[in-house]
Image (cartoon, helix red, strand yellow):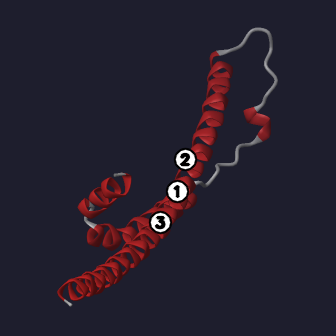
Amino acid sequence: MLARTILKVASQIPWEKVIELAPSVAERAGTLWKSIRSKNKRISIDENIAYASYSTELSESDILKARLDRLEERVESLEEQIQASSGLIKTLAEQNTLLVQRIELHRIRLIRQSFLFAGVGAVLAGMIVYLFIR
């Protein structure tokens, strides 16, 4: 019952399209990874300006500098997260391509085995008919 269900589901998947599109998915993930890495140019900031010691009474420019520092830290954190995410997407796309190739190989083997068993079954059925007729 389980094998029949698996075969039914597997037969409804458009394998030609999946196999055809798998390399382009991997290629696009690689392109995304390269574009994210090239855009990750860090802007160097003068340490004296970025981390100036603040007095107890902060001026408006000091408050703005502090906010800017926090925003820069958040942007760097987000860039690192984007790099990690795009790396993951690239890895998943490559694994998807390998998985599709393996599934296609197993599908071909299953078809060959089905023909083999059908042939063996036909030979056995023929032998049984021959023995009953004889």
Residue under label 1, please give it: 36
Residue 3 vertical placement versus 110 (above, below) = above
Residue under label 2, please give it: 82
Extreme residue toward the left, this view = 133
State how far apart marks 1 and 3 are (Cα): 26 Å
For the point 43% across and 76% down, the residue is 105
Estimate the x, y position of residue 22 in percent, counting from the top left. 38, 68
For the point 39% across and 65% down, the residue is 25
Q: Secondary structure at mark 3?
A: helix
Extreme residue toward the top, this view = 57
State how far apart marks 2 and 1 are (Cα): 7 Å
Q: Secondary structure at mark 2?
A: helix
Dots 2 and 1: beta carbons under 8 Å?
yes
- Of pointers 2 and 3, the one earlier in the residue sequence: 2
Residue 53 vertical placement versus 97 (above, below) = above
Q: Residues within 10 Å of mark 2 (few under 14, many from 20)?
A: some
Residue under label 3, please give it: 99
Residue 58 vertical placement versus 13 (above, below) = above
